[in-house]
Image (tube, helix red, strand yellow):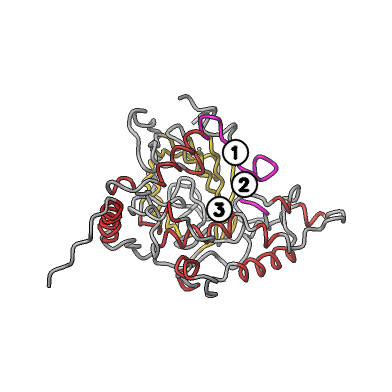
Amino acid sequence: MRSRFQGSTNRPLRKEVKWRFPLGHRSLAWLGAAALVVAPASVLAQAPSGAGAKPSIAATRAPASKAWTAPLTADGHPDLQGTWSNASLTPFERPKELAGKEFFTEQEAAEYARRLIDQSNRDRRGATPEEDVNGAYNEAFFDRGTKVASNLRTSIVVDPADGRVPPLTPEGREAAAARAVAQRRRPEGPEDFALPVRCIMWPTAGPPMVPGGYNNNYQIVQTRDYVAIDIEMIHDVRIIPLDGRPHMSSVIGQWMGDSVGHWEGDTLVVDTTNFTDKTHFRGSDRNLHVVERFTRTGADTLRYRFTIDDPTAFTKPWTGEIAMSRATGPIYEYACHEGNYSLASMLAGARAEEKAEAGEKPRKSSK
């Protein structure tokens, strides 16, 4: 379908979903962290909101940055190379408690971060055995960041102006409901497990590249003809040509889509189409079109802006912005399941449950 772009985009899990995110798997820990980072309403309710007071200019506008000139590569374009992190405590969508407030003040940002870190502390054990097991990963396993992003925004989503992802279309809601039903079914084979459980794709890998509970680092390598992005989460690498080639045939779909790039002044623009119907970024489908914009804003800062357009999934396009910061390398390989041994165990457990429901007695192991 033709894109609307013009030109070149812990709560413990219920028993019925345990097969998609088995206990002890890092995806479960990520979901819990994401729930706290993306929509921490209870934390925000305590944070200063400035209610009843006229906001100052500092509270409604990002701090001005000093003039800075990006270093150039041999071919004359800004040098984006290095390892960058998008870890931050900035909510993905603007909480309702901060409606109409685009930016934190520095004081508000510090107080918000303090409360969120305290609220999301995973070193505290659960009140029940189930909560304790579901929250087994402690703080050592997380790298959510320790503060709000340097742009002081109250949400990663910047358009629409309310900082919220637009609603799904009727078709998008129907597809999401069907996926939810499928996730509650007992798995017949490995294909029935979610992509993160199978170590194929992670929601934060991109495009778009958004922060998660950990592994928020990206290494950029740049030449005249290509830009490569090494993604820490499940060690994917995006290779983006800059030679003006068109997208591949629309009949070919890829996990991370087909990316092509070009320069617009000092900004690298990456246009990605050709997604599959198995990756669903916040409800997207195979018609997802992502446009990313990478701009150096300082010696240790990179502005990453992305626009999502998917006319069959979302009621209108929407945009997010992340202030990435330089990180010390190197990026080490993330081996995920180290062979996915857990898949065999989960499938064996599913077959054992079927036998139990059929009244068959489990066989005793021979020694």
Q: Earlier in the sequence, mark 1 or mark 2?
A: 2
User: Circle 2 — which element?
Assistant: strand
Residue interval drawn in magenta: 154-173
Residue 83 visible, this angle: no
Q: Residue 157 carries which label?
A: 2
Q: Which residue is drawn at 28% across and 49% down?
A: 190
Residue in view at x 70 percent, y 41 percent = 161
Mark 3, other Cα within 10 Å: few <14 / some 14–19 / many ≥20: many
Q: In this view, does 199 lie above or below 174?
A: below
- Residue at which label 3 appears: 296
Front residue of 324 and 129: 129
Please state if 180 lies on the left or on the right of 333 as rendered.
Answer: right
13 relative position to 108: left or right: left
Residue 83 at x, y percent in the picture:
45, 61
Mostly what secondary structure, the magenta segment?
Answer: loop
Q: Is residue 171 magenta?
A: yes
Q: Residue 84: image x %, image y %?
A: 49, 59
Residue situated furthest right in the rendering: 53
Dividing the image into 4 quarters, which one contains the C terminus? bottom left
Separation of disc 1 and disc 2 at Cα? 8 Å
Which label lies toward us, 1 or 3? Answer: 1
Q: Nearer the viewer, mark 2 or mark 3?
A: 2
Q: Distance between the residues labelled 1 and 3?
A: 22 Å
Kind of residue indicated by mark 1: Trp
Magenta-colored stretch includes residue 52 = no
**Residue 179 position (above or below residue 79):** above
Q: Residue at x 36, y 65 (%)?
A: 332
Circle 2 residues within 10 Å: few <14, some 14–19, many ≥20 = many
For this view, does 186 lie left or right of residue 40? left
Residue nearest the observer in this picture, 159 or 92? 92
The residue beneath circle 1 is 318
Q: Distance between the residues labelled 2 and 3?
A: 20 Å
